[in-house]
Amino acid sequence: MNIELSMDLVICTYNNASLLDLTLKAISRQKVPPEVGWSVLVVNNNCTDETISVVDKHIKSGKIPSLSMVLEPKQGLTSARLCGVKNTTANWIAFVDDDCLLQEDWVLQAIRFASEHADCGAFGGRVVLDWQTPPPPWALNYGYSFAEQKLGVNPKQVSCLVGAGLIVNRSAIVNSGWTDKQFLADRVGKMLISGGDVEIALRIAANCDLWYNPKCKLKHVIPSARISKKYFRDINYGLGISKLLGDTMLWPGSFLTWLIASVIAALRSSFRIVPQALRAAIGRMEMIEVAINLSFLLGNWVGISTIIRMNAQTRRTLLGCASAAVRRVDFGE
């Protein structure tokens, strides 16, 4: 293993002190050889709860090497992530959510993989959902809503990665242009906007390989409040928008061909809602699943509208900015 390689863990947080405490406790139990350079930076995105005292407690414990905190006044996860990149120096950056519990060898496995795949643009690991309350059966069909990631038992190249536990090569994220210009918003306060992690992964993938490494395993804590039907509808509405914007970044053709293809795809999805509603009416499908799928579809239509109304220059820059990623991995793998 290359002991010169270093890694900074960046934890962006907003008013989630209790889960942040659990996240930092898990990090404090990491088993990492002393010769490996790693540190942890908490990005405080205008927290008004007990976040500062939680971080101070862990700093005083001394169990996490080089733990520090910085304030990012511009609200939103994308701004917080950018702050984390700008306030760290390691050649690898790991974005760890404030509700993720890392397995004890997560950092070590990440360092090993990075050392063995120096040209990799980014990689991610196994993300297991840790439900605080047993979810209803239908909820298990929507693991993607909570960044669930299980892509097999062996390392492999992939087309995209979730944001929970996303590990990026600093040179790759800088060369992608993301640090200079970000297109997609992500969680702004309590608004369930998403897409920032997709943008990072796709823009890096335009020039570098993305990998999945199942040895980097973490638990993503899902609080009871997040299994409400409203939450599923709202988050899938946001995911529908981000999916459309992500597809736009991959589109290799003109705006007109993108518009035609996007409208046709959205219309086809709209037609598929009708038989789903009929199945729900006769009890062969949960009605909430129809509502969730409809919310995702509405998000798609809003995404199309957003691109149409976008400033023409920004739209030209966004359209196809990650299209080279299409050639790298078959989405059907």
Image (spheres, helix red, strand yellow):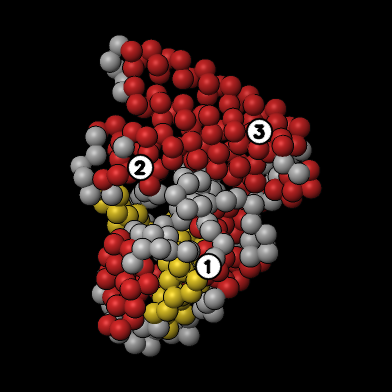
| CA neighbours of label 2 inside 10 A, class few (<14), some (14 to 19), many (20+) | few
Q: Few, some or many C-alpha atoms within 10 Å of disc 1 (few <14, some 14-19, many ≥20)?
A: many
* CA–CA distance in space, label 1 to label 3: 31 Å
Write down the residue under mark 1: 72
Q: CA separation, marks 3 and 2? A: 27 Å
Q: Within 10 Å of the Cα at label 3, are there few (<14), some (14-19), or many (20+) other Cα atoms?
A: few
**Residue drawn at x 66%, y 29% as measured from the top left:** 261
- Position of 48 with respect to 263 (left or right) is left
Residue 113, given in percent of the width and then of the height, sits at 42, 69
**Residue occupied by mark 3:** 305
The amino acid on which the numbered mark 2 sits, given as a three-letter code, is Gly
The residue tagged with tag 3: helix, strand or loop?
A: helix
Residue 233 picture location, percent across and down: 41, 34
Residue at 29% across / 67% down in the picture? 21
**Which of the two labelled residues, at mark 1 and mark 2, occupies the earlier sequence position?**
1
| Residue that sits furthest to the right in the current view | 313
Q: Looking at the picture, does residue 19 appear above or below residue 69?
A: above
Three-letter residue code for mark 3: Ser
Label 3 or label 2, whichever lies nearer to me, is 3
SS state under label 2: helix
Q: Residue at x 36, y 68 (%)?
A: 51
Q: Position of residue 290 (x, y in %)?
A: 39, 24
- Foreground mark, 1 or 3, reads 1
Q: Which numbered marker is on residue 143?
A: 2
Q: Is residue 74 above or below residue 285?
A: below
Front of the two marks 1 and 2: 1
Residue placed farthest to the left in the image?
A: 134
Depth order, front residue of 88/170? 88
- Residue at image point 30% right, 40% down: 227
